[in-house]
Image: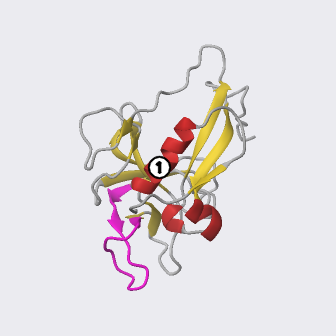
Amino acid sequence: MQPTVLDCSTNSLGCWTAAKLVTTSRWATNGDFSYDLAFAVVGPGGLDGATGLEIAIDSTAGGDATPAQVGFNRSRGEFLASFGYPQAPPYDGQDLFYCAGDAQAWDRLNRRFLNSYDQGLKCDLTGGSSGGPWYAEFDTVIGAGIATSVNSFKYLGDDSTMHGPYFGNYAQKVYLEAVDASGSGDNATVGPPNSLP
């Protein structure tokens, strides 16, 4: 059986092309996984009748009832659902998988959880799932939630925990830079705000 080939003509919504990418300078320059995040400035696209999704922002600590798709400075330790298309065995990259649980911060030096800039989620997803969203308040009926991190990396010796950056002040600054970007142009890196994370 031939695998289904999805491209812009066979996808029911079509495609939108990223015109510009905006990321943290700490990731682009230093490879700092605590700030491994980016936002894409997306141009027009899609098939006839398909519309893009409006993005609302929840910048409150702990969240509120405001509908949102990206959240910043939310309480740590939330119950999150992580999604991805893992490719490394035992997966083959063809199907969407998820993990869910309470996120915790990780102390790299002492190999224990505490208040660090990245966070961990018990999850056996493998390589290929990088960049997949971590959703708080995920609604299984409509398939939406508030993105608060992304799949990024695993520490050597711990295949059971996926790590991702905490969407705090720095992530919000990068997002706002992407929102303010107009049209295509050079990709951009954003320096840290006065206060981290």
152 and 21: which is toward the camera: 21
139 relative to 32 in the view: left or right: left
Report how many numbered discs are placed on residues in the image.
Answer: 1
Indicate whether 49 appears above or below 177: above
Name the residue at the top extreme.
49
Residue drawn at 46 percent across, 65 percent down: 163
Residue drawn at 50 percent across, 76 percent down: 155
60 and 86: which is toward the camera: 60
Q: Is residue 114 magenta?
A: yes
Residue drawn at 71 percent across, 35 percent down: 184
Regarding residue 145, the answer to whether it shows in the image is yes
Task: Give percent across and percent down for residue 95.
Answer: 58, 47
Disc 1: which residue: 173
Which region shows up in magenta?
A: 100-120
Q: How would you classify the magenta stretch by its main secondary structure?
A: loop
Question: Mark 1 belongs to which amino acid?
Answer: Lys
Task: Give percent across and percent down for residue 135.
Answer: 39, 47
Task: Give percent across and percent down for residue 191.
Answer: 54, 58
